[in-house]
């Protein structure tokens, strides 16, 4: 999300802003949301996605237009989502969760592509907010349910897998269609989760800065899935085919001209968001010209870990990660000290190097680098 705020606007209130975000936005394990949905409402939300929230005054026309698939993956099957998943999701829409999820206040550190940055509404010195979360416990349960349901499918369809923890089924089989229908419902829930988080962030900024969020220019730049299987049309050899593209720890990066990009970005290419870590940087890129031929229109979703959570926690012993971040100019707040240890900057690869690789490969092209100022985590 971009804003019309500058670093000078935010610096005097940064600590208060981050503290208020931690108080007002549910973050961490077991934190219920500010929006509770009945099972019937949840099924409607999973069917309709972000347009459902718009009908309730919790999303704008631009919020819908600038979300992948307009915040609604077609052919979702909420009726295939278990009661256990519904129970887990009833109070978690609009919550950050834990692990690598976060809300981060950032400043545009430098612009690499002025024309693309202008198309995205970005400029040096501008304040932005990056939100990373997904389908929370509901999505986790959909996955867990699916793993059990698919356990015998490989044998049934004559498939041999190298690990008993792996499962699969033909896309067009009843099992494959069941999974895709439930997964799409969870994806729509994830779009709504991030939309509600953004709405709450807008309200906190308005409260702290004493101005309506509209006057602060708090507009969505783009929202995109980062763990999803989608049926898309791609060139395979000399033939255009419908294929199932599974982006796990990856994100879409369609190039300029692609019909699935919002109209206002079509000439530039899809906005691509690559988080780094809370001590160094994140990046906004645009879909590159070689992404379709090399990766089915895909790039990396983040910098990627170089230490496991266990190794990162061990490496943090005897250190105060929060103080280290503050000395680097980042105000960090976390519900759990273990959370900061697991997510410390050294647990991640250097995002600048990772982004340089996908840029040179033509998968996604650099637009702007964003430096963290403050972050809340679970």
Image (cartoon, rainbow, N blue to C red):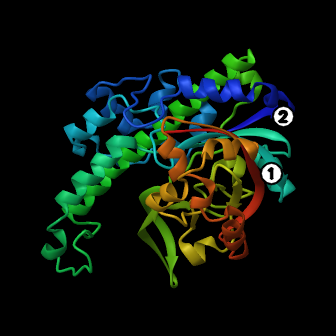
Q: How far across and how far down the image is residue 136, in percent? A: 39, 42
- Tag on residue 117? 1
Mark whose residue sits in front, 1 or 2: 2
Q: How far across and how far down the image is residue 170, in percent? A: 26, 70
Q: Is residue 133 in view?
A: no
Considering depth in this image, is 241 or 90 the residue closer to the camera?
90
Quickly name the residue at label 2: 6
Residue extending farthest bottom: 237
- Above-or-below relation of 135 to 298: above
Rendered image quadrant of residue 288: bottom right
What kind of element bears circle 2? Answer: strand
Mark 1 or mark 2: which comes first in sequence? 2
| Horizontal side of residue 264 vs 191, given as left or right | right
| Horizontal side of residue 245 vs 340, given as left or right | left
Q: How far across and how far down the image is residue 214, in percent? A: 71, 23
Identity of the residue drawn at 48% across and 41% down: 191
Density class for disc 1 (Cα within 10 Å; few <14, some 14-19, many ≥20) is: many
Identity of the residue drawn at 82% across and 50% down: 109
């Amino acid at each position: 999300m971009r804003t019309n705020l500058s670093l000078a606007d935010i610096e005097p209130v940064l600590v208060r802003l981050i503290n208020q975000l931690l108080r007002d936005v549910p973050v961490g394990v077991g934190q219920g949301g500010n929006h509770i949905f009945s099972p019937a409402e949840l099924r409607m939300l999973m069917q309709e996605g972000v347009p459902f929230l718009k009908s309730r005054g919790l999303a704008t026309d631009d919020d819908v237009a600038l979300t992948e698939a307009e915040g609604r993956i077609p052919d979702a099957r909420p009726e295939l989502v278990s009661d256990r998943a519904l129970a887990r999701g009833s109070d978690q829409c609009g919550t950050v969760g834990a692990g690598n999820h976060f809300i981060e206040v950032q400043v545009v550190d430098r612009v690499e592509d002025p024309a693309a940055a202008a198309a995205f509404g970005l400029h040096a010195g501008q304040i932005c907010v990056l939100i990373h979360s997904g389908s929370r416990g509901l999505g986790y349960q959909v996955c867990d349910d699916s793993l059990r349901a698919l356990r015998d499918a490989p044998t049934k369809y004559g498939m041999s897998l190298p690990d008993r923890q792996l499962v699969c089924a033909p896309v067009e089989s009843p099992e494959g269609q069941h999974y895709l229908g439930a997964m799409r419902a969870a994806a729509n829930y994830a779009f709504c989760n991030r939309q509600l988080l953004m709405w709450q962030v807008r309200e906190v900024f308005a409260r702290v800065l004493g101005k309506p969020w509209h006057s602060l220019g708090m507009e969505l730049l783009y929202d995109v899935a980062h763990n999803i299987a989608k049926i898309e049309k791609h060139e395979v050899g000399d033939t255009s085919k419908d294929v199932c593209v599974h982006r796990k720890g990856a994100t879409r990066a369609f190039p300029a001209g692609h019909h699935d990009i919002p109209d206002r970005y079509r000439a530039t290419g899809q906005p691509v968001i690559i988080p780094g870590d809370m001590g160094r940087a994140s990046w906004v890129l645009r879909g590159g010209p070689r992404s379709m031929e090399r990766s089915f229109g895909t790039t990396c979703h983040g910098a990627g870990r170089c230490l496991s959570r266990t190794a990162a926690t061990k490496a943090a012993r005897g250190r105060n990660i929060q103080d280290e971040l503050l000395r680097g100019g980042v105000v960090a707040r976390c519900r759990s000290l273990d959370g900061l240890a697991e997510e410390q900057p050294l647990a991640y690869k250097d995002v600048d190097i990772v982004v340089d690789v996908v840029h040179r490969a033509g998968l996604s092209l650099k637009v702007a680098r964003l430096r963290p100022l403050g972050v809340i985590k679970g």
